[in-house]
């Protein structure tokens, strides 16, 4: 069948059609319309589609008849510094976007785990926020609107291009963290921030408990920090946990807030550090384990939840957000262990999301796992609207979910 797919796609897209390393037909649309056309063709012929970004986060191993990659969607449509908004195609690498925004003295306050060459679409589809979520919130808070190609070949545009416009917010929110189950994000209008004049970073090293209490004290003191994050020894390659505090603003403001953070930390010594290098190294550390999960735990429960995660999944790389809450773990584990952890945390109403894993684990555990009573029928109806014939390979609930 791959020969037929190649011929039909070739007539539609020409040189944009190739084969992936496993021999599957692969198309790299360059526009939203082309993406919708590729999915419409798959819908009409009953082809299963695997969606790929730049191949730096999720393994490209889901079984499919056709690969649709966003690598051709790599253009920055517009940057409006005065409005703090940019329109960006989903395949654009974060590194490329950051360089372009820096020329306008702006930045996108997303620092997700993984390679700096991750595509914007990968971050939006998986909603993998990094430590800066402490100050700037989850991924959905950075997205004003999206253009999405549905699995039956339609284009859906939701949201707006200005910060005050909330029209269509729920539809945009649906796509953020949807893992491609509701269509392919082709373009996004993202919220920017003015680049700060100064950034100050400090690090404390030690056991988890004293660092956690120091972090809570800094949060309670309402220090205006971008990042307050706890990193496990396997993340930093050291023998102890580390508390990372990063502050940005004016020169005087950043210096003053860092002094307040040191005072609040008490006996835990915050020492100056190179925040950029440590942040990049920490983010890339989560690529070293084949499986990554995140849990939406409240701040006060994080040490206990961290112990439970290690007990159930085994040792791994871990980060904790003592300000907004949340935990990320990366390592080697199994479908059965993930299911058991989900069951245990469900009693505490803590959701566990499978962020990345090889296909057998994604298929077995699902990105979200078994949905709560009443949610599964709603999810099925929503997927039926965007993917009526099951074209997109996106295991949200898991094999037995």
Image (cartoon, helix red, strand yellow):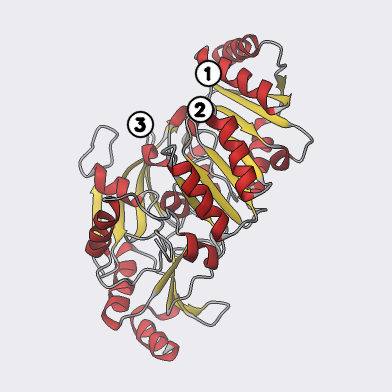
Marks 1/2: CA distance?
Answer: 10 Å
Where is residue 110? Give x, y as percent. Answer: 49, 39
Spot occupied by residue 377 in the image (x, y as percentages of width and height): 25, 57
Q: In percent of the image, x 53 and y 56: which residue is there?
A: 356
Q: Is residue 324 visible?
A: yes
Q: Are marks 2 and 3 in contact (CB under 8 Å)?
A: no
Residue at 53%, 70% in the rendered image: 61
For discs 3 and 1, the disc positioned in front in the rendered view: 1
Residue 105 drawn above or below residue 77 = above
Q: Dot 1: what SS?
A: helix
Mark 2 or 3, nearer chain start: 3
State the image quarter where residue 81 is shown: top left
Q: Position of residue 255 (x, y in %)?
A: 61, 13
Measure the alpha-carbon separation of dots 3 and 1: 31 Å
Q: Is residue 387 left or right of residue 194?
A: left
At 47% from the left edge and 54% from the top edge, which residue is drawn? 122
Residue in the image at 34% along x and 67% along y? 35
Mark carried by residue 219: 1
Q: Secondary structure at mark 3?
A: loop
Residue that label 3 marks: 82
Residue marked by disc 2: 299
Q: How many marks?
A: 3
- Residue 186 vertical placement versus 345 (above, below): below
At label 3, counting other C-alpha atoms closer than 10 Å, the crowd grade (few under 14, some 14-19, many 20 or more) is few
Location of the C terminus by quadrant is bottom left
Dot 1: within a 10 Å radius of its alpha carbon, few (fewer than 14), some, or many (20 or more) residues? Answer: many
- Evaluate if marks 1 and 2 touch, with contact meaning CB atoms under 8 Å apart: yes
Foreground residue, 378 or 137?
A: 378
Nearer-N-terminus badge (1/2): 1
* Quadrant in which the N terminus is drawn: bottom left
- Residue 159 occupies which quadrant of the picture? top left
């Amino acid at each position: 069948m791959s020969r037929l797919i190649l011929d039909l796609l070739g007539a539609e897209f020409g040189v944009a059609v190739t084969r992936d390393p496993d021999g599957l037909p692969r198309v790299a649309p360059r526009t939203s319309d082309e993406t919708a056309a590729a999915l419409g063709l798959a819908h009409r012929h009953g082809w299963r589609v695997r969606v790929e970004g730049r191949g730096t986060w999720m393994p490209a191993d889901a079984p499919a008849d056709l690969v649709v990659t966003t690598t051709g969607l790599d253009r920055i449509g517009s940057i409006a510094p005065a409005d703090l908004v940019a329109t960006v195609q989903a395949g654009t690498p974060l590194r490329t976007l950051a360089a372009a925004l820096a020329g306008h003295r702006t930045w996108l306050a997303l620092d997700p785990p993984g390679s700096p060459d991750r595509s914007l679409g990968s971050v939006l589809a998986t909603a993998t926020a990094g430590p800066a979520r402490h100050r700037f919130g989850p991924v959905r808070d950075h997205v004003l609107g999206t253009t999405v190609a549905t699995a039956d070949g339609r284009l859906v545009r939701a949201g707006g291009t200005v910060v005050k416009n909330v029209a269509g917010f729920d539809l945009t929110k649906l796509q953020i963290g949807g893992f491609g189950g509701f269509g392919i994000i082709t373009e996004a209008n993202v919220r920017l921030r003015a680049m700060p004049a100064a950034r100050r970073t400090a690090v404390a090293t030690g056991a988890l408990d004293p660092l956690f209490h120091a972090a809570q004290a800094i949060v309670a003191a309402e220090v205006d920090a971008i990042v307050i994050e706890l990193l496990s020894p396997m993340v930093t390659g050291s023998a102890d946990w580390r508390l990372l505090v990063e502050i940005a603003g004016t020169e005087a403001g950043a210096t003053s807030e860092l002094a307040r953070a040191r005072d609040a930390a008490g006996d835990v010594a915050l020492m100056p550090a190179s925040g950029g290098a440590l942040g990049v190294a920490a983010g890339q550390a989560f690529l070293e384990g084949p499986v990554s999960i995140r849990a939406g735990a409240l701040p006060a429960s994080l040490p206990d939840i961290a112990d439970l995660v290690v007990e159930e999944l085994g040792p791994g790389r871990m980060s904790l957000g003592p300000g907004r809450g949340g935990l990320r773990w990366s390592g080697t584990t199994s479908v059965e262990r993930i299911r058991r952890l989900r069951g245990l945390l469900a009693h505490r109403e803590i959701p566990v999301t499978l962020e990345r894993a090889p296909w057998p684990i994604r298929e077995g555990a699902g990105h979200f796992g078994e949905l709560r009573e009443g949610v599964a029928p709603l999810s099925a109806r929503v997927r039926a609207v965007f993917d009526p014939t099951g074209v997109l390979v996106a295991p949200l609930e898991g094999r037995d979910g």
